[in-house]
Amino acid sequence: MSYRIAVIGGTGPQGKGLGYRFARHGHTVVLGSRSAEKATPVAEEVTARLADVEGAGEVLGASNTEALVGADAVLIAIPWDGHDEMIASLAADGGLDGKVVISCVNPLGFDKGGPFGRAVEGGESSAAESAQRLAPGATVVGAFHHVSAVTLWGEEEYLDHEDILVCGDDAEAKQVAIELARSVVGRDGVDAGKLRLARQLEPWTAVLISINKRYKIHSGTRISGL
Amino acid sequence: MSYRIAVIGGTGPQGKGLGYRFARHGHTVVLGSRSAEKATPVAEEVTARLADVEGAGEVLGASNTEALVGADAVLIAIPWDGHDEMIASLAADGGLDGKVVISCVNPLGFDKGGPFGRAVEGGESSAAESAQRLAPGATVVGAFHHVSAVTLWGEEEYLDHEDILVCGDDAEAKQVAIELARSVVGRDGVDAGKLRLARQLEPWTAVLISINKRYKIHSGTRISGL
């Protein structure tokens, strides 16, 4: 099935990289940013990259609010700083109501000791759960936290050495992310369980970045035994 | 190099399974429990299992306190409930001073929604960091959180589809766990970074257990790109 996907924060490396992957596999992608003026050149860059890809979907640029119009799914790919304000503002006029919202937001910090996970509400919440609380009319799932922006924008057809882990409390919404994972890794995402497991999926990225720094690689996570 | 390893909680499935793997590859293992009487039959069971394994190390049973005597490394394999009391009691008479302490403790909870990570000190600590605080004379690392007890006790020579992630603030102590990983997965453990990343490594096990329940497997974690 082909979706129309709004990417909030679509000009950032993660949003642009995932948008590129979704469009490469036939989905229509609207990259959202603070303003359409900022989003349009990035959409053109991704479109140019897809020029020779048969069956690629259209890539458009829009303001974040405009990007939501008509979207089947919304990917939240914004930094954790300012996350709650952004979600509240998108939700304020009902723009997220009835939509499947996929959060790949990672609340991370960095200091001289390296990357670390930031505890959300004393460790009892996560970016995805915050989004669900602030946009009660949406159905939020967590996914795509661990794929590296560099790898997403790279040449490999599929990042098939990694798994996309999906968490959420609604099976149908989870299924959308599980399907979209095919565009990235060439196979279904892995159903990791309840939305609250976003508390583990999100800051796991700190472990991967730490490994990247030590071993000079772009690491990913694979679940063995599947 | 061959170590003498005390396993605190050595009669539990994780401690017994890891002790079995270490002994199978030539290390001397002292399985500790509340009492020597409880530990001895388990040590005999592991010894019997190793009867045909050339070069296997000795497996002994002892009380947790006795197990520490002469140990090069101490594996903490106890439940999170009661963890701090146990560590404080082992540390009280200096029993952990100067030792490399490897914690595989996972603070997890379970309810009708499945497994979940328990936030330690508002998400700003972990079992491994608690152990370090309670045993300041020891050098604590985190490792072996994700291997399934069933797989450890199984027939495979190596669990080579998984990675052992090691975190800690002391390079030498980390190296001990990195080496011991060879007994389990057939290759070095992965240096994941600072001890505080135990906040991510420990509750990640909730994600694996959740996946196990959904897919009826014994999952593990592999880092891609290494």
Image: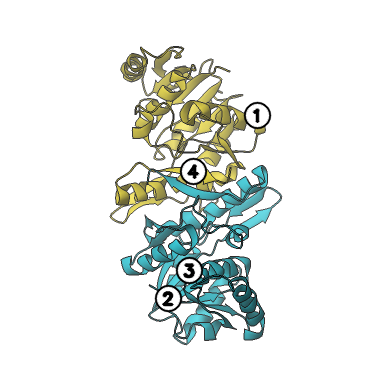
Chain colours: A cyan, B yellow
Residue B56 location, quadrant:
top left
Q: Residue, x 43% and y 47% (percent of image)? A: A223
Q: Identify the amino acid type marked 1.
A: Glu
Q: Nearer the viewer, residue B5 or A69?
A: A69
Q: Mark 1 falls within which chain?
A: B
Please rate how many residues cluster around mark 4, counting C-alpha atoms within 10 Å: few if below 14, some from 14 to 19, many from 20: many
From the viewer's perspective, tell me whether residue B33 is left or right of residue B74: left
Q: Would you name the residue on which mark 4 appears?
A: B222
Q: Identify the amino acid type marked 4.
A: Arg
Q: Mark 2 falls within which chain?
A: A
Residue B81 location, quadrant:
top left
Asked if both marks, 4 and 1, belong to the same chain, the answer given is yes
Q: Marks 2/3: CA distance?
A: 10 Å
Q: Would you name the residue on which mark 3 appears?
A: A25
Please rate how many residues cluster around mark 3, counting C-alpha atoms within 10 Å: few if below 14, some from 14 to 19, many from 20: some
Q: Identify the amino acid type marked 3.
A: His
Q: Residue, x 37% and y 16% (percent of image)? A: B50
Q: Secondary structure at mark 1?
A: helix
Q: Would you name the residue on which mark 2 appears?
A: A3
Which is more N-terminal, label 3 or label 2?
2
Mark drawn on residue A176: none
Q: Residue, x 61% and y 30% (percent of image)? A: B175
Q: Position of residue A108 (x, y in %)?
A: 59, 58
Say whether marks 2 and 4 touch (CB < 8 Å): no
Q: Marks 2/1: CA distance?
A: 51 Å
Q: Marks 2/4: CA distance?
A: 31 Å
Residue B93, can we see it? no
Q: Would you name the residue on which mark 1 appears?
A: B172
Say whether marks 1 and 3 touch (CB < 8 Å): no
Closer to the eye: label 2 or 3: 3
Q: Position of residue B216 (x, y in %)?
A: 29, 46
